[in-house]
Amino acid sequence: MITVTCSKRITTVLEREIGELGYTVVSKSINSIQLEGDIVDCMKLNYYLRTGNQVLLEIKKLHAQEPKQLYEQLLTIEWDKYISKLGYFSVVSTGFNENINNFMYVNQLCKDAIADYFYKKYDQRPDSGPDKHKVVIRLYWDEHEAIVYLDTSGETLTKHNYRKAPHLAPMQEALASGIIMASRWDKRSHFINPMCGSGTLAIEAALMATNRYPGGFRNNYSFMHSMDYNPEAWEKIRQEGKKLYTKTDIKIIASDISAKSIDSAYKNAQTAGVDHLIEFECCDFRDTTIPEGNGVIMINPEYGERLGEIDELTEIYSGMGDWFKQKCAGYLGYIFTGNLELAKKIGLKPKRKMEFYNGKIDCRLLEFELYTGSRKIVPTKD
Ligand SMILES: C[S@@+](CC[C@H](N)C(=O)[O-])C[C@H]1O[C@@H](n2cnc3c(N)ncnc32)[C@H](O)[C@@H]1O
């Protein structure tokens, strides 16, 4: 059984991604999805998924209520199927167990069990530590049951590895692709991203429009360090992934008032190999080019944390509403914000409100239909 973890509120999008890869979802929770599959399926999920965090392959379910029992059960796993006696591994444990208030202790217990298994069989043991760049073992311990997983990803999949240029408040890549997938953008119409910051939304849109996947940018996954790693199977997945690349003639425009932001967005797009697909403009959002035709305009404005900022942002939020109304007819407008009070200042009635988290911040993706002709854009009453 495979478990793919994700951020809360991304599950619906992740489920769609998994379905499009041809898998059937067996069950899901608030931040994970379960499906049937083996290590090769894990490799495939690692390569293609844009919105997942970790791809976990179940090693064994253990019945244990207290630490000694857990240690003994852990010794029954054939650890040398996954970890080389000269290798390196890391353990991450979580869960809810009334006997445990510090899961660092469970990490240590699991490390000890693995070390003892190797000492007994080989008279030597692999190294261990916190780095997640080699074999990673995850242990989830509920009251009576513990599940041990091979974390085939290791380092999180939420980073898509093209963002090298720094920016103050960048959006996590998995969240950016998640909100694009939750929108009604069809990948064949224009994608306009004012206030682009480090360019995450525009870059994710360019990657999606050309069928490029996160696995194309990453050289190391934990599964590569597992004893059952099959490099030929991985190479096949990579080659198949590359064959899906397509061209696009849509317009993707990224703009920002800050020259520094545009510079970092451009550098990130270069790293992602999509700089030639994006037109960069350094301007106020109101001056962003809106090409003939239709598509999506997606904006992630600042949310405002300090008092002084709120007045300025009130103007920005109502300005976005006016701009949508006056200049963006024919497009679908989206505003992603973590400030629900400021969102009211947009002054337009959203057609849909989709819930997300940005870290711990309760956020909304607001959708506005910016019709031309007789179907008017609906202003809010307040
Ligand atoms: C929250 S950040 C966007 C982060 C972006 N989603 C990313 O992934 O990096 C908001 C951006 O809006 C830009 N901005 C603020 N006021 C603006 C304005 N009036 N016109 C255009 N851009 C503006 C800021 O320079 C900042 O880069």
Image (cartoon, rainbow, N blue to C red):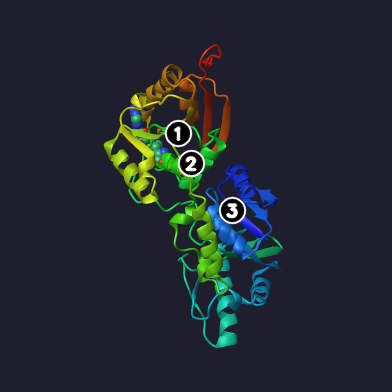
Q: Is residue 334 left or right of residue 17?
A: left
> Residue 338 at what x, y percent from top left?
48, 34
Q: Does mark 1's beta carbon lie closer than 8 Å to ligand 1?
A: no
Q: Do labels 2 and 3 touch, CB within 8 Å?
A: no
Residue at the spot 49% in from the left edge and 80% down from the top edge? 86
Q: Residue furthest bottom?
A: 123
Circle 2 sits on which residue?
209
Q: CA distance from mark 1 to mark 3?
A: 29 Å
Q: Do labels 1 and 3 touch, CB within 8 Å?
A: no
Circle 1 sits on which residue?
191
Circle 3 sits on which residue?
5
Q: CA distance from mark 1 to mark 2?
A: 10 Å
User: Is 264 drawn above or below residue 348 in the view shown?
Assistant: below
Ligand 1 visible in quadrant: top left
Q: Which element type, helix, strand or loop, lies under badge 1?
A: strand
Task: Look at the image and tell me in which quarter the N terminus lies.
Answer: bottom right
- Nearer to the camera, 376 or 260: 376
Q: Do labels 1 and 2 touch, CB within 8 Å?
A: yes
Q: Which element type, helix, strand or loop, lies under badge 2?
A: helix
> Residue 33 at what x, y percent from top left?
64, 51
Q: CA distance from mark 2 to mark 3?
A: 25 Å
Residue at the spot 55% in from the left edge and 39% down from the top edge? 181
